[in-house]
Image (spheres, rainbow, N blue to C red):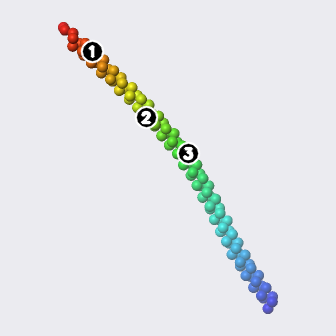
Amino acid sequence: MAGLFSVQKIHLFLREAETNQSKMEKFESNVATINDMNSMIATAIEQQTAVMNNVNEHVHEVRNLSEESKSLSSKGLDLSKELNAISNTLTNSLSHLKI
């Protein structure tokens, strides 16, 4: 009986070893999946950072163009006021002329 008891223990040990090996393979597979996911996340973050930097540059460009447009509009208004004053002066001068 002692020999049979040892054989049973060996079979039990082998089954546990197979179960543990299967669990380790699953664990390794899960670790590989997590590593792949981490790589994809890192790539996505890099891409999003590049896009955000591009958007940021365009926002600054739009702001600069808006400031330039505001300045040009202000100059246009000033020129328009000057032209109006010149027109009024000419109108007054011409109204005094008699033909």
- Which callout, 3 or 1, points to the residue nearer the camera? 1
Mark 3 element type:
helix
Whether tag 2 and tag 1 are in contact, CB under 8 A, the answer is no
Residue positioned most to the right: 3
Quadrant of the snapshot with the N terminus? bottom right
The residue wearing badge 2 is: 66
Q: Secondary structure at mark 2?
A: helix
Binning the other alpha carbons within 10 Å of mark 3 as few (below 14), some (14 to 19) or many (20 upward) gives few
| Amino acid bearing label 3 | Ala
Q: Above or below — where is 30 with respect to 17? A: above
> Which residue occupies the foreground of this view, 2 or 74?
74
Q: Residue at x 65, y 68 (%)?
A: 26
How far apart in space, not on screen, are marks 3 and 1 (Cα)?
Answer: 59 Å
- Residue sticking out furthest to the left: 99
Task: Give the mark, 2 or 3, whose residue is nearer the N terminus.
Answer: 3
Graded by Cα atoms within 10 Å as few (under 14), some (14 to 19) or many (20 or more), the crowding at tag 2 reads few
- Examine the rendered structure and indicate whether residue 66 appears above or below residue 75: below
Query: What percent of the width, then of the height, locates residue 46?
Result: 58, 49
Choose the circle earlier in sequence order: 3 or 1: 3
Mark closer to the chain start, 2 or 1: 2
* Kind of residue at disc 1: Leu
Q: Estimate the x, y position of residue 40 in percent, counting from the top left.
A: 59, 55
Q: Which residue is mark 3?
A: 50
Amino acid carrying label 2: it is Ser
**Is label 2 or label 3 in front?**
2
Say what secondary structure mark 1 lies in. Answer: helix
Left or right: residue 63 compared with residue 39: left
Q: What residue is at 47 percent from the left and 34 percent from the top?
A: 64
The residue identified by callout 1 is 90
Total marks drawn? 3
Q: Going by the image, does 23 lie left or right of 91?
A: right
In front: 4, or 41?
Answer: 41
